[in-house]
Image (cartoon, grey):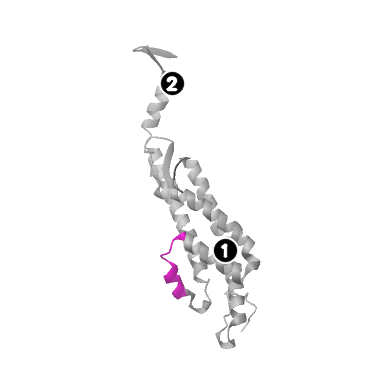
Amino acid sequence: MTIGLNNREFSVNASIELLMELNDWKNRDAFQKAIGHFSIEFSRLELGVTELASFSIDDIRYWQVEFKNVFGLSLEVKRDLVKKFIKKEIPDIYPTWKSINEQIGLLNHERRHLIHGTGESYLFHTKMTTTIKNNGIVESKTYTISDIKSITNRVAHVNTGEHGILGSFNTEFKTAAINWYNQNAARHERIVYKVNNDIVTDWKG
């Protein structure tokens, strides 16, 4: 059904839908909640990369000191520290890290949009559009609440899914790094690494 008004036709049904959307403040709350969950999960990811970077040093006994040194570095720099260390010292696990690192790069791009992008108001709409400058080019992306939740799930998978940097890959990386360190360390300086009270390093003490 349509009606004429000032020589223009308006769909009654479409107008009602628009009014319902404009008055749906739940969209604002849902977007804020979804972005909040994404931000928290991504913070866990960055913390995991920071820990890996702090182990990417010659004397792993001082990883906690290195953690403070790398904490304030950009995510890109931390990722590069891990990449260089793995390629040079423990290359057997590089293919796994390469896959993880690629996913982190894609997710960090989403983070730039969701956290730092200039966004058009999503207070009264079911979609939001963000804009960033990427390699000198202005780039815009549109997200629904479902999109953001899906991206958050991808971050969670990198954290704790198969080969998670807070899970199995964390253990695999530390075990390989400590085994490498022990091969070059004096006997009294070697490290025994345990997971769930089980020694996982080659050196058992």
Residue 28 seen in this snapshot: yes
Q: What are the residue bounds of the magenta stretch?
A: 64-75
Residue labelled with disc 1: 167
Residue 99: x percent and y percent? 60, 57
Residue 51: x percent and y percent? 49, 67
| Rendered view: 165 above or below 134 | below
CB-based contact (under 8 Å), mark 1 and mark 2: no
Q: Is residue 118 left or right of residue 99?
A: left
Q: Residue at x 61, y 76 (%)?
A: 180
Does the segment drawn in magenta span residue 165? no
Residue 12: x percent and y percent? 41, 18
Residue labelled with disc 2: 13
Query: Relative to the observer, which residue lies in front, 105 or 126?
Result: 105
Q: Amino acid at mark 1?
A: Gly
Q: Amino acid at mark 2?
A: Asn
Q: Secondary structure at mark 1?
A: loop
Secondary structure mainly formed by the magenta segment: helix
Q: Residue at x 51, y 62 (%)?
A: 79
